[in-house]
Amino acid sequence: MKIIIESNEYSSHKDLSEKDQDLISFAIKHLNTSHSPYSNFKVGAAVRLQNGKIWGGSNQENSSFPVGICAERVAISTASSQSPGISISSIAIVYSDHENNHNSPLAPCGMCRQAIREQTLIQKSPIKLILTTLHGQTMVISDADDLLPLSFTLKN
Ligand code: THU
């Protein structure tokens, strides 16, 4: 078996569509709502629904570390609880740390990939991932499921 992940890379947000730039701006805005006193690593996420609605989220940490939750899962859970039954078409993810001199986009953690995978199974349509940085370097993956091949699902 050979697993191939396809992505498109950009060096500036301006190279993306206006819709995608708006979603990125929403994710960047949500960095301000991050509660991350333990890692000092802020993550912002924004999901665009098929009806055009956008929901955001940020990482929420806890003094009992495992209680913390990633930005992606906050945003997805907000969308599915506030706009139930509406498919997600894309998710933008951005981060900021002490130095903010990073050039590579954040790849979602394994738990978030599993959460996104469950969402694509529910909605039966792919979710585009826009992984970006404050400086503009961006990676777009047209089907988030590509990041979790051979996943565990209800079928298993
Ligand atoms: N984090 C996210 O919010 N999303 C990810 O995909 C990876 C990590 C958060 C969790 C924690 O609050 C901080 O980043 C450092 O791991």
Image (cartoon, rainbow, N blue to C red):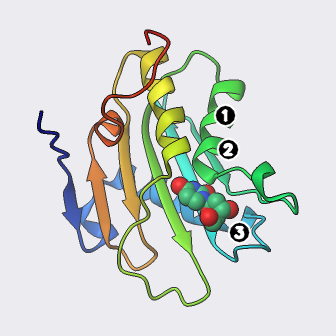
Quarter of the image containing the N terminus?
A: top left
**Disc 2, SS:** helix
Disc 1 beta carbon < 8 A from ligand 1?
no
Give the residue pinned by disc 1: 77
Q: Residue at x 64, y 19 (%)?
A: 84
Mark 2 vs mark 3, CA separation in Å? 14 Å
Mark 1 vs mark 2, CA separation in Å? 5 Å
Give the residue pinned by disc 3: 32
**Disc 1, SS:** helix
Q: In the current view of this chain or complex, which residue is farthest to the left?
A: 2
Q: Residue at x 55, y 90 (%)?
A: 99
Q: Quadrant of residue 115?
A: top right
Give the residue pinned by disc 2: 74
Q: Nearer the viewer, mark 3 or mark 1?
A: 1
Front residue of 83 and 37: 37
Comes first in the chain, label 3 or label 1: 3
On screen, 17 above or below 28?
Answer: above
On screen, 2 above or below 133?
Answer: above
